């Protein structure tokens, strides 16, 4: 089964081989972006963002434009007919008539799956509630492959909001499929990984430890994935204020880290990474944002059938 006309709703929708196929194409695009400038000429991407976003939305729009395609859509629910009471299913059925591929972010978990069931074109989940964010995971994996040159036998540290952070959930489920990957989860007790993720790792035989201190195991980590404590995921403002500053990465903590560790963050950053870290050679989060464009370029090219699997050549 090829990737053409497939949807990407969950981080596990593609096999390891299919995923690596996308990442390999993304690496080729990174090395020679101008060669792919007309690959999706005449194609239209619908950007449906029912929830505010800067990086993901602009990254997708940059990706389709760099491939020669065009963009239609909206950047907030208030700009759509949802404010008039239109159902999500009707919105998707309508947009299918206008676009060749749909990219959607929605505040409700499961919304992307609903969209995929009624859409006549490929649907990409750009984040649904606290559930998943599969293209951020493609971005993360591309960054790790680019910097570490492999995705096997890594110790991946995840720090911050591990309970509500959909980027962490997607990355952990996905990268744990590679050989020898283990995890260090550093968070306050209130923001530990959810039980479904713990069950997933246990059933897969993946090794992990949980700690309430970032610096305890930093020397073991090959990758440190920082996340912010998200105000919008809290019902109680007092809990947010109490927890948001507990885990801050600074140069003092990095004294104990490996010289080739890479520091990732899905962004936006609040104060969980001190600005002094930006000039450290291990800081890769802005490079990571750039990798997201190429990961999404490769994904859309594959879903729209613009590149063959065997030769990775154009078919349009």
Image: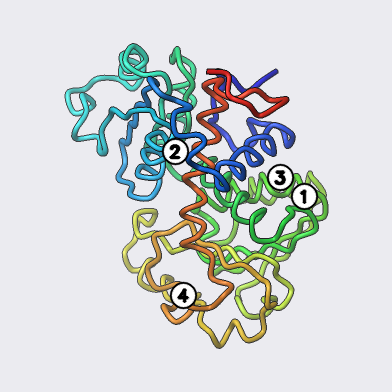
- Disc tally is 4
Q: Earlier in the sequence, mark 1 or mark 2?
A: 2
Measure the alpha-carbon separation of dots 3 and 2: 22 Å
Helix, strand or loop status at disc 4? helix
Measure the alpha-carbon separation of dots 4 and 3: 34 Å
Residue 1: mark in rendering = none
Identify the residue at image location x=50%, y=75%. 247
Left or right: 58 in relation to 297: left
Q: Nearer the viewer, mark 1 or mark 2?
A: 2
Identify the residue at image location x=49%, y=21%. 122
Relative image position of residue 249 (x, y in whole percent):
51, 77
Q: Which residue is mark 3?
A: 200
Q: Which residue is mark 2?
A: 126
Q: Earlier in the sequence, mark 4 or mark 3?
A: 3
Q: Cβ–Cβ below 8 Å for labels 1 and 4? A: no
Identify the residue at image location x=35%, y=71%. 241
Q: Cβ–Cβ below 8 Å for labels 1 and 3? A: yes
What is the crowding at mark 1: few (fewer than 14 residues within 10 Å), some, or many (at least 20)?
few
Q: Which residue is mark 4?
A: 278
Q: Which residue is mark 1?
A: 202
Identify the residue at image location x=19%, y=28%. 83
The answer to whether residue 190 shows anywhere in this view is no
Above or below, 198 against 228 in this view is above
Helix, strand or loop status at disc 1? helix
Q: Nearer the viewer, mark 4 or mark 3?
A: 4
Measure the alpha-carbon separation of dots 1 and 3: 6 Å
Q: Cβ–Cβ below 8 Å for labels 3 and 2? A: no
Relative image position of residue 202 (x, y in whole percent):
77, 49
Left or right: 106 in relation to 294: left
What is the crowding at mark 3: few (fewer than 14 residues within 10 Å), some, or many (at least 20)?
some
Above or below, 245 against 164 in this view is below
Q: Nearer the viewer, mark 1 or mark 4?
A: 4
């Amino acid at each position: 089964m090829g990737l053409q006309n497939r949807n990407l709703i969950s981080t596990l929708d593609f096999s390891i081989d299919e995923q690596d196929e996308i990442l390999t194409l993304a690496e080729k695009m990174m090395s020679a972006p101008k060669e792919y400038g007309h690959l999706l000429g005449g194609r239209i991407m619908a950007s449906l963002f029912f929830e505010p976003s800067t990086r993901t939305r602009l990254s997708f729009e940059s990706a389709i434009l760099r491939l020669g395609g065009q963009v239609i859509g909206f950047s907030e629910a208030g700009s759509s007919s949802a404010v008039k009471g239109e159902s999500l299913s009707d919105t998707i059925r309508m947009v299918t008539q206008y676009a060749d591929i749909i990219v959607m972010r929605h505040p409700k978990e499961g919304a992307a799956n609903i969209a995929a069931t009624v859409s006549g074109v490929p649907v990409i989940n750009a984040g649904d509630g606290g559930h998943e964010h599969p293209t951020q995971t493609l971005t993360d994996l591309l960054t790790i492959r680019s910097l570490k040159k492999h995705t096997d036998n890594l110790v991946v540290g995840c720090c911050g909001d591990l309970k509500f952070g959909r980027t962490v959930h997607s990355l952990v489920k996905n990268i744990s499929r590679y050989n020898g990957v283990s995890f260090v989860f550093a968070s306050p007790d209130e923001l530990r990984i959810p039980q479904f993720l713990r069950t997933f790792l246990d059933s897969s035989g993946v090794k992990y430890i949980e700690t309430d201190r970032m610096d305890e195991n930093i020397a073991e980590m090959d990758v440190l994935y920082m996340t912010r404590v998200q105000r919008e995921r809290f019902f109680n403002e007092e809990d947010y204020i109490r927890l948001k500053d507990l885990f801050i990465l600074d140069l003092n903590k990095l004294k104990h880290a490996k010289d080739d560790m890479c520091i990732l963050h899905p962004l936006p950053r609040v104060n969980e990474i001190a600005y002094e870290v930006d000039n450290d050679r291990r800081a890769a989060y802005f490079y990571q944002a750039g990798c997201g464009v190429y990961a999404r370029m490769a994904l859309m090219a594959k879903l729209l059938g613009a590149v063959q699997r065997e030769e990775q050549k154009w078919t349009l």
